[in-house]
Image: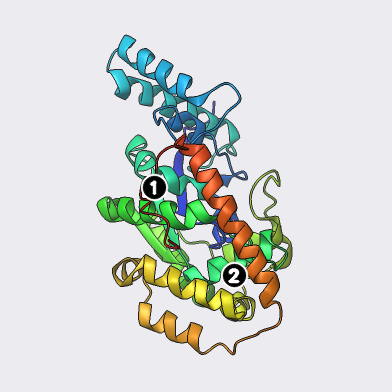
Amino acid sequence: MKNRVKPVFILSLPRTGSTLLQRILASHSQISSNGEFWLLLPFLYTLRKNGVRTEYGHRFVHRATGCLCEAIPDKVDGYLRRIRELMDNLYNDASTEGTTYFVDKTPAYVLIAEEVIRLFPDAKFIVLWRNPLAIIASAVEAWGGRRWNISEVYNLITQGLINLIEASQKHKDRICFVRYEDLTVSPEVELRKIMAYLDLDYEADMIKNFSQIQLKKIMGDPLGAKKYKSISRESLEAWKKTLAGLLRKVWCRRYLKWVGKNNLSIMGYDLEELQQELNNIPIRYRGIFRDCRSMVFEKIKIKFWKRILTDKFKENQKDRFDFEK
């Protein structure tokens, strides 16, 4: 019979290098991992009235879950305990025999960061930050084919970001914080810090062997896995070329202002420095009309889906996560 593994969660926004970190950790002899699970999202969203649109009607699931919680011992706590037991069993089944930890990383978990941290009191948590401008640029490259396409990650880089900041500050004594830039520039230093947090010995071959780790390709970042076979600093400046368009720079200035100096400081970044870096990028006017068209379409798309997910077509409620108003 296998030893029971402990879960390690990498909590991060999309396009932060979480797949890179996952593969590096999975190259350790005591750590297993296997793509992205996503399962905690539907399980924990049963306790949320809004945020899900389904063919069968999520509101009925939410209502039925409430009735179930009333009928069982310990109410909601008992329900959550059963979810944790199920996930623990799945992590154990998906792990390699003899390992100590199983790494689960799913960027959308930032939407339920507080719930995940409270659900697993004995788990380990690594919060991975990255320059938010680089995240935006990487999202455009990955899902837009260089065309402006932020709707895929909008909810995560707004509501998800605030959720992660608030949860990580509330539980900071339980969390190991890493910046993507530090991991790229000084990988051994950051990995030794993570290994100390996990009470594991650092293995020097992790940096060299991570490219041999093949995770399930159903979910995750296939682009980075194919492009980078070693830890590279190439991505540290690549975002500037992608965000050189006039309208893109305007959008990013507003986004940085919305995130705010204090939140950026918590993440390990300085607002004025990021603003200066953005301002220093030579403006590219080519493609400005295409960006204008894409941004209008994206704004309509984002507002439409936000209303769909909250069932509030008739309400004109102020949205704390809409910085473009």
The disc label shown at residue 137, or none: 2
Task: Depth check: give the residue in front, 271 or 283.
Answer: 283
The residue wearing badge 1 is 124
Residue 17 in the image: x percent, y percent?
56, 62
Question: Disc 1 vs disc 2: which is toward the camera?
Answer: 2
Look at the numbered discs 1 and 2 and tell me whether their residues touch, using CB distance below 8 Å. Answer: no
Going 39% across and 28% down the picture, which residue do you hit?
47
**Quadrant of the drawing holding the N terminus:** top right
Q: Quadrant of residue 289?
A: bottom right
Q: Is residue 62 above or below residue 285?
A: above
Residue 284 in sight here: yes
Q: Amino acid at mark 1?
A: Lys
Residue 45 in the image: x percent, y percent?
45, 32
Q: Residues within 10 Å of mark 2 (few under 14, many from 20)?
A: many
Q: Is residue 224 left or right of residue 202?
A: right
Going 56% across and 57% down the picture, which residue do you hit?
299
Q: Amino acid at mark 2?
A: Ala
**Quadrant of the drawing holding the C terminus:** bottom left
- First in sequence, mark 1 or 2: give its number: 1
Q: Residues within 10 Å of mark 1 (few under 14, many from 20)?
A: many
Residue 102 in sight here: no
Q: Is residue 52 left or right of residue 81?
A: right
Task: Depth check: give the residue in front, 196 or 319.
Answer: 319
- How many numbered tags mark residues here? 2
